[in-house]
């Protein structure tokens, strides 16, 4: 049975963070390939004299060549990315559709994010970046959701937390998610837009063949963006 590792990250995931966009996504790798790919990614960082953890929030022109090499490596190797892009987060009606809870909406997103991974000949280990003090409760709920959906026979073997610096695949996920959120928010069109971030967006769009703010075809495997549109409330 083939086993995969899935590294999940998210951006603008809090309910009251004054953002109209939310993105949750992952980078996936075959477990038997993980050590080689991790070593390759770390070697790329060292070649660019950057041993520290990379963050979208700290993208700078001085490291533009590093970002370009990491993105090129992703598209040339057996790695896969998928995310759910939530636009109009401010218009979500949690009372009508999510039992009055933003957390319930979050668990739904995790389920829809991972749902395409259901091959009967595969199993999956899911790693989530630690985001807040309620992480243990969220892990318990996510496990419960998948056990219920799969009637106790879930292909997802484990859900566990890791710190983002513990795997370079979190860094790739953060880079892609950050780029998608940046484009969806229209930040690339604002005066003083970060030129390094714009270069990252342009490279990803060129290599993937998709505009990051518009989503991809549902059957896209390598770089999949599910463009979520919230259902309109019956109250308006």
Image: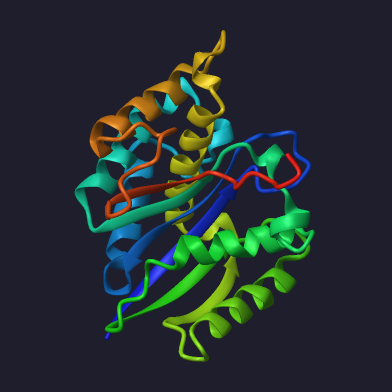
Rendered location of residue 223, percent (x, y): 32, 48
From the viewer's perspective, tell me whether residue 87 is left or right of residue 227: right
**Does 119 sit above or below residue 227?**
below
Residue 193: percent from the left, percent from the top? 53, 15
Q: Is residue 183 left or right of residue 30?
A: right
Q: Is residue 202 above or below residue 55?
A: above
x%, y% of residue 133? 78, 62
Q: Is residue 166 above or below residue 56?
A: below
Q: Does 24 sit left or right of 104 as displayed?
A: left
Name which residue lies at 36% across and 75% down: 118
Q: Nearer the viewer, residue 66 or 79?
A: 79
Residue shown at 55%/63% (left/top)? 110
Give the residue at the far left of this rendering.
76
Q: Residue 106 in the image: state x and y as whole percent.
A: 65, 59
**Residue drawn 53% across and 80% down?**
149
Residue at 29% of width from left, 57% of height from top? 79
Using the image as rendered, state which of residue 34 and residue 96 is in the foreground.
96
Please state, as top left, top right, bottom left or bottom right, where the C terminus lies in the image: top right
């Amino acid at each position: 049975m083939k086993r995969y590792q899935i590294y999940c990250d998210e951006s603008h995931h809090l309910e009251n963070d004054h953002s109209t966009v939310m993105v949750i996504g992952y980078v996936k790798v075959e477990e038997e390939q993980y050590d080689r790919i991790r070593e390759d990614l770390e070697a790329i960082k060292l070649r660019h004299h950057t041993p520290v953890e990379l963050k979208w929030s700290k993208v700078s022109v001085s490291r533009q060549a590093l970002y370009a090499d990491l993105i090129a490596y992703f598209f040339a190797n057996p790695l896969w990315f998928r995310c759910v892009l939530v636009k109009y987060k401010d218009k979500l009606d949690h009372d009508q559709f999510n039992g009055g809870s933003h957390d319930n909406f979050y668990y739904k997103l995790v389920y829809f994010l991972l749902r395409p991974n259901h091959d009967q000949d595969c199993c999956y280990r899911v790693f989530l970046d630690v985001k807040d003090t309620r992480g243990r409760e969220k892990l318990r709920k996510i496990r419960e959701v998948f056990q219920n959906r799969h009637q106790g026979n879930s292909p997802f073997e484990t859900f566990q937390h890791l710190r983002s610096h513990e795997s370079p695949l979190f860094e790739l996920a953060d880079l892609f998610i950050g780029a998608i959120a940046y484009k969806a928010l229209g930040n690339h069109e604002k005066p003083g837009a970060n030129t390094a971030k714009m270069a990252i967006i342009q490279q990803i769009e060129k290599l993937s063949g998709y505009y990051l703010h518009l989503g991809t075809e549902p059957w896209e495997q390598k770089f999949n963006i599910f463009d979520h549109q919230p259902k309109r409330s019956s109250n308006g």
